[in-house]
Amino acid sequence: MSSLFDRHKAVIADWVALYYRDPIEITHGEGRHVWDAEGRRYLDFFGGILTTMTAHALPEVTKAVAEQAGRIIHSSTLYLNRPMVELAERIAGLSGIPDARVFFTTSGTEANDTALLLATAYRRSNQILAMRNSYHGRSFSTVGITGNRAWSPTSLSPLQTLYVHGGVRNRGPYAQYDDQRFVEACVADLEDLLGHTRDVAALIAEPVQGVGGFTSPPDGLYAAFRRVLDRHGILWIADEVQTGWGRTGDHFWGWQAHGQAGPPDILTFAKGIGNGMSVGGVVARAEIMNCIDANSISTFGGSPITMAAGLANLSYLLEHDLQGNARRVGGLLLERVRAAAAGVDAVREVRGRGLMIGLELTEPGTDRADPEAASAVLEAARERGLLIGKGGGHNTSTLRVAPPLSLTVAEAEEGAAILEEALGVL
């Protein structure tokens, strides 16, 4: 009988990536652990790409899904939907955006797609500013604004995209500056760029770049950008698909590290809110959300079953202060990872905040990315019972560590110890 891997290769697109030389089938999970088809247990420090936000098989979410499935699974947005309205009310209140309206989608890609539609319709412009090293999804429009060659398979786009400096602190032409000078240089670059464009619709930016390798600018950069954007009437879209819901520890939303000039005009979310269910969405001021002058619905966005999961998951996160846990345990984990990487010449930088930690690997003594080293550590960690991720705009050479927000101190210590052993293969 053919292996599942063979069957996968026979029917799934070649460009659908799989981790590991011998890919694993994950069959079930509990808490911060998952098991493969061979019965081996792993400590999960990637959470299905930052999506299992609270815990695997969280009883509160499982119960909510089962109870809702027993009533009705689907109706579409053509009918009133109590769980959708209730979750929208909670997210609007948490967003920080005044007079907020919410539209639910099934993914972060679709959420960013919708944000681009809103911004371009509201501003009557197809020009978008995006950050270098960014990633915003895999649809035609979001690929077109992604500033990361490894994840952008075409240059064709309905949008004209211009890329701004600032998303990566320790690479690029301003890396040698202190934080204040770095921000000033990036703002000057933005000002100069706007002097060469027609009217721009929006700037879209991840407060912490996810696929880009958990890079981020100094706090306050996007506030400084916002002051420039406001003078031109340009909207600010905060892509919170990976940074939202307290993952960064210090803030509930990533944009709050840049909130000195106010909240974003549009906020997108997905991944963690559903804890594995397909939930995404957009929050925007009413005048922006309501600017669409054609009919629109969503067949699957805001479905009763995914909204029930989102409500239960959000309630659990808030009631158990998982943002505080991300700050406390994430701080400990970052300290332990830095200690594990100390003396490893291939580790160029350990960075992150909360439970978003990146280890950038390069050829020792250089700034040249070393994707082979990243793959070797990924494999070594799996062999020792730890699942982590990869990313980075420089040839996917950054290891990404992003456990569920309920991570315990003991699990953080265990994961850091395994990662230290895995780095020993370099």
Image: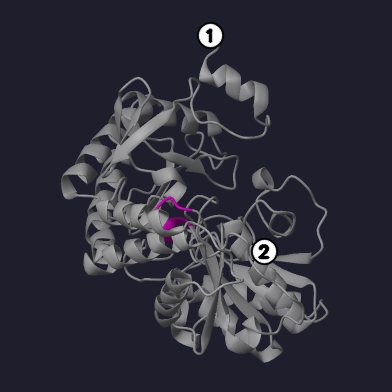
- Location of residue 135 by image quarter: bottom right
Image quarter hosting the C terminus? top left
At horizontal 49% and vertical 72% (from top left) the residue drawn is: 81
Which residue type carries mark 1? Met
Is 144 or 162 nearer to us in this picture?
144
| Number of numbered discs on residues | 2
In front: label 2 or label 1: 1
Q: Is residue 333 left or right of residue 365?
A: left
Against 73, is 253 above or below?
below
Horizontal relation, residue 101 to residue 251: left or right: right
Please, what secondary structure does the residue beneath circle 2 have?
helix
Q: Residues within 10 Å of mark 2 (few under 14, many from 20)?
A: many
Among the 4 quarters of the image, the one containing residue 385: top left
Spot the residue most to the left: 410
Residue 120: horizontal and vertical position, in percent?
75, 76
Crowding near pointer 1: few (<14 within 10 Å), some, many (20+)? few
**For this view, does 289 lie left or right of residue 1?**
right
Determine if residue 111 is in view: yes
Which segment is the magenta one? 271-277
At which x and y percent is residue 26? 40, 31
Q: Is residue 122 above or below residue 323?
A: below
Q: Which residue is mark 2?
A: 113
- Which residue bears the numbered disc 1? 1
Q: Amino acid at mark 2?
A: Asp
Residue 410 falls inside the magenta stretch? no
Image coordinates for residue 150, horizontal then vertical, percent: 66, 43
